[in-house]
Image (cartoon, helix red, strand yellow):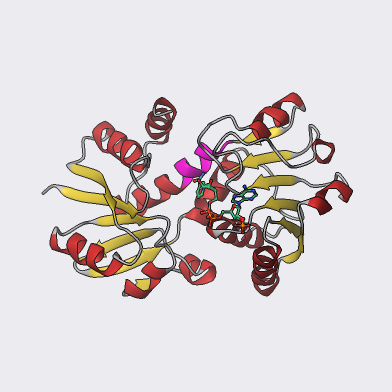
């Protein structure tokens, strides 16, 4: 029987998830299909009812529903509880089970490249939904401390509080404060929306050198200004598409209980740009 999967959110038309998952189904000759379904803010309950009616097998959840979706689940995994948001739902015969694969998706390329997180010092730009999963990931892997820089200081303060509560030592600073930082960060992560519209990098270049790992989670364009600057300085680089791929692979494995075809899914993403 054909199994249907989906991603719900708004906006949704530019989502790469259908491309990635359908490429995997084709490769493994699975009788599955994956669609993008626009569900506007305020319409989540109706959207879920519609998905249940078509006996959806599972779905991904993206902006703006990741937090509200928690209210519609029959049970959630530990990552959802920790982060307070869900991005993957499995429909187990009418029982909706929630998972959060953003954290493992973020960590996946770091682990794949065998980079050390334990005891590391992190600079994180951004304090939105994705940043929460990132902070939780660094805490899980025993990073030493994290400096959070955000445009709106109060949002940065809130994320620092969340991090300290989890047990990862955090401080919140302003964008201007970055000019006075020492250049001893092991990881510099951009989890803000900066770069999405080809904006210039705002992280001072004196903060990174060839030992620094620069991770830009913005995946469109593939090469943001931050990535280009990091290349000039010979930094170790992790691209946003690698996180996107990491979370898609985890969702695939939760739904289908088998290993995802990494290379095929990667090729489908890079072909989509
Ligand atoms: N690679 C992946 O798999 C993946 C996964 C999730 C998200 N992302 C990308 O990551 C980015 C953030 O996602 P999100 O879900 O965390 O979004 P979000 O919840 O809307 O948060 C956006 C963050 O970016 C900051 N920001 C927005 N415009 C800015 C600007 N002009 N200058 C400085 N800071 C700015 C916001 O600061 P304020 O607090 O001041 O508003 C906030 O911290 C998006 O570009 C998204 O596409 C990638």
**Is 197 within the magenta?**
no
Work out whether 207 lies above or below 37. Answer: above
Work out whether 265 lies above or below 179. Answer: above
The quadrant of the rendering that contains the C terminus is top left
What x and y, as percent, mark residue 241?
Answer: 50, 37
In the picture, measured across the screen, residue 262 lies left or right of residue 26, that is: right
What x and y, as percent, mark residue 263?
Answer: 42, 31
Name the residue at 46% across, 66% down: 85
Name the residue at 75% across, 64% down: 170
What x and y, as percent, mark residue 28?
Answer: 26, 35
Instruction: Give the magenta range.
Output: 239-246
Identify the main secondary structure in magenta.
helix
Count of numbered badges drawn on the protein: 0
Name the residue at 77% across, 28% down: 233
In the picture, measured across the screen, residue 70 lies left or right of residue 131, that is: left
**Is 244 within the magenta?**
yes
Name the residue at 36% across, 44% down: 259
What x and y, as percent, mark residue 271?
Answer: 40, 25
Residue most extreme to the left: 1
Task: Say which quarter of the image contains residue 228.
Answer: top right
């Amino acid at each position: 029987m054909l199994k249907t999967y989906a991603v719900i959110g708004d906006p949704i038309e530019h989502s790469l998830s259908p491309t990635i998952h359908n490429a995997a189904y084709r490769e493994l000759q699975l009788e599955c299909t994956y669609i993008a379904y626009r569900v506007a803010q305020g319409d989540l309950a109706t959207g879920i009812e519609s998905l249940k009616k078509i006996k959806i097998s599972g779905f991904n959840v993206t902006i703006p529903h990741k937090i509200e979706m928690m209210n519609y689940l029959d049970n959630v995994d530990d990552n959802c509880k920790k982060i307070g948001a869900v991005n993957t739902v499995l429909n187990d015969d009418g029982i909706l089970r929630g998972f959060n694969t953003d954290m493992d998706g973020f960590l996946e390329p770091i682990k794949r490249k065998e980079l050390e997180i334990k005891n590391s010092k992190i600079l994180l730009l951004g304090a939105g939904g994705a940043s929460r999963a990132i902070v939780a990931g660094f805490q899980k892997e025993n990073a030493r401390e994290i400096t959070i820089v955000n445009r709106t200081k109060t949002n940065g303060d809130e994320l620092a509080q969340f991090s300290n509560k989890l047990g990862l030592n955090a401080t919140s600073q302003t964008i201007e404060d970055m000019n006075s930082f020492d250049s001893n960060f092991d990881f510099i992560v951009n989890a803000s929306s900066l770069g999405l519209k080809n904006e210039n990098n705002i992280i001072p270049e004196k903060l990174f050198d060839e030992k620094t790992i620069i991770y830009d989670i913005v995946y469109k364009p593939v090469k943001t200004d931050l990535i280009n600057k990091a290349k000039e300085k010979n930094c170790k680089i992790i691209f946003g598409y690698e996180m996107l791929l990491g979370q898609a692979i985890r969702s695939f494995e939760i739904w289908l209980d088998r290993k995802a075809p990494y290379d095929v899914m990667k090729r489908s993403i890079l072909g989509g740009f």
